[in-house]
Image: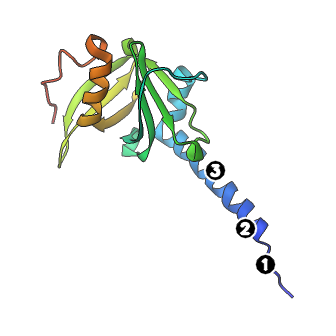
Amino acid sequence: MNSSRPEYVFIALIGFLSTLFFLIGRISGWSTLANFYRFPGEFVGQRWRFQSGQLRWHLGYNNCLTIGANESGLYLSVFFLFRIGHSSLFIPWDDISINMKKGVWSKYVELRFRQAPTIPFRMSQDLSDKIAQVAGCLWPGETSREKVVS
């Protein structure tokens, strides 16, 4: 008699998803950013939950990011169920450069980071505008916001 053991299926599923999330963190570059910008504390500032962004190779984090901003920098965190391999990040404004880009359907913003210049972070222009409003004159793109790179 062959009986099914649901607890083994559950354990295998958890193991598979944990490995998948860990690999996504490595492939996307999130773990590289965490080497320099890991943030173990509690973020204080404006937050926007369930946001989307893309990292290296256009790997999308759709509706699972919490993005925050304050006078010191940018905060990035992944929804707690997907956090394996994705430490919370805090990047000071001085370490961020910005480029406006134009995609097929819309404009977007690409951030680059001084400590990890090969890892881009792309977000919608609408989200970028919200962050810029909180950052004020510290937002790294204020002088170049009108330039759009194709």
SS assignment at label 1 = loop
Residue beneath the point at 37% across and 15% down? 93
- For the residues labelled 1 and 2, say whether their Cβ atoms are less than 8 Å apart: yes
Q: Which residue matches tag 2?
A: 9
Position above or below: 53 against 134: below
User: Is residue 95 in view?
Assistant: yes
As helix, strand or loop, the secondary structure at mark 3 comes to helix
Q: Is residue 133 above or below residue 17?
A: above
Q: Are marks 1 and 3 in contact (CB under 8 Å)?
A: no
Task: Report helix, strand or loop for mark 2.
Answer: helix
Q: Position of residue 2 (x, y in %)?
A: 83, 84
Query: Picture quarter containing residue 69?
Result: top left
**What residue is shown at x 52% (from left), y 42% (from top)?**
79
Q: From the image, state whether disc 1 or disc 3 is nearer to you.
A: 1
Could you tell which of marks 1 and 3 lies nearer the N-terminus? 1
Instruction: Tell me whether the residue at label 2 lies in contact with that at label 3, contact meaning CB atoms closer than 8 angstroms.
Output: no
x, y percentage for residue 38?
56, 24
Q: Position of residue 63 (x, y in %)?
A: 41, 47
| Depth order, front residue of 12/47 | 47
Foreground label between 2 and 3: 2
Which residue: 56% across, 46% down?
82
Instruction: Tell me the amino acid under the disc marked 2.
Output: Val
Tell me the residue that label 3 is attached to. Answer: 19
Q: Which residue is mark 1?
A: 4
Q: Earlier in the sequence, mark 1 or mark 2?
A: 1
Q: Amino acid at mark 1?
A: Ser
Q: Is residue 12 above or below residue 63?
A: below
Most foreground residue, 63 or 106: 63
Which colouring convention does the figure follow? Answer: rainbow
The residues tagged by marks 1 and 3 sit, at their Cα atoms, a distance apart of 24 Å
